[in-house]
Amino acid sequence: MLFAAGLGTRLKPLTDTMPKALVPVAGQPLLWHVVMKLKEAGFERIVVNVHHFADQIIDYLAVQHNFGLDIRVSDERQQLLETGGGIRKALPLFDAESPILIHNVDILSNVDLARLYDDALQSHVDALLLVSRRQTKRYLLFDDEYILDGWTNIETGEVKSPYAGLDPSDLKQLAFSGIHVVAPSVFPLLQDMPERFGIIDFYLKYCHQRAFLGFEKKDLRLIDVGKLDTLGEAEQFLQSLNQQQTIHN
């Protein structure tokens, strides 16, 4: 599932006339970059959720002939449902027996998505979250086995966890990437959440009952193309990834 419904407020004024998903980087929309990465990884069915300038995304996919894939649209034009609500609304568009890889449209990275998905399948966890040790204000908290125990904002000191008295300093503090795999085992639990909810809130609510595992990529290279000043950086980032791929080939 490709999350493309966001308002993209940090990319204004570009997003005053187009959705974030169609903001160009290195000559192609963000949507193109992520769809091509998913296609190269072997994914054949992609659900794209839409809200802001939804018709532009739908028209773009039509012009691209859905990139030769089974691309389906989850329409959130009536109400933006956040990440958790967006997944729940899109469930009928997926195979109910298969895990879903979730990817934000504004994330570019060097992640091997096929391997991440395979690891989720082999480990039989309820969710596998791609994390790393990059610097941020908000961290997910994991025990020594990389089982999710909570969340913290190191700037405010706020902690969220079903475990009372959790001390973030006792745990691995890892940054979430916006890329994760959700197993069918948790699909029924999504029905018990509010109409709109963030998927991290869901993970934190049930992490004491289900196995939500962190997958730490040591050499993760990732850029969140969320602000105007990151557009130039993103172009250089893609060039460096391509150069690295050429060398490996």
Image (spheres, grey):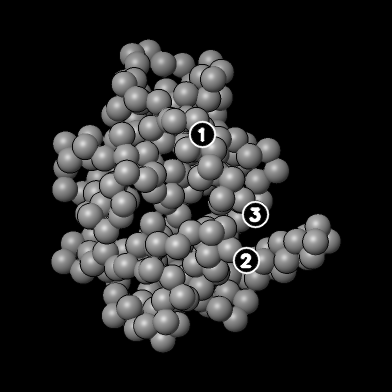
Please give the name of the residue rendered at 54% of the width and 29% of the height, measured from the top-left corner. Answer: 173
Frontmost of labels 3 and 1 is 1
Q: Could you say which quadrant of the image residue 53 lies in?
A: bottom left
The amino acid pointed to by label 3 is Asn
Residue 94 in picture, x, y percent from top left: 30, 55
| Label 2 element class | helix
The amino acid pointed to by label 2 is Ala
| Label 1 element class | helix
Q: Is residue 9 above or below residue 111?
A: below
Q: Which residue is mark 3?
A: 110
Name the disc covering residue 122, or none: 1
- Tell me the quarter of the image containing the C terminus: bottom right
At label 2, counting other C-alpha atoms closer than 10 Å, the crowd grade (few under 14, some 14-19, many 20 or more) is many
Distance between mark 2 and mark 3 Cα atoms? 13 Å
Residue 6 in picture, x, y percent from top left: 34, 63
Q: Earlier in the sequence, mark 2 or mark 1?
A: 1
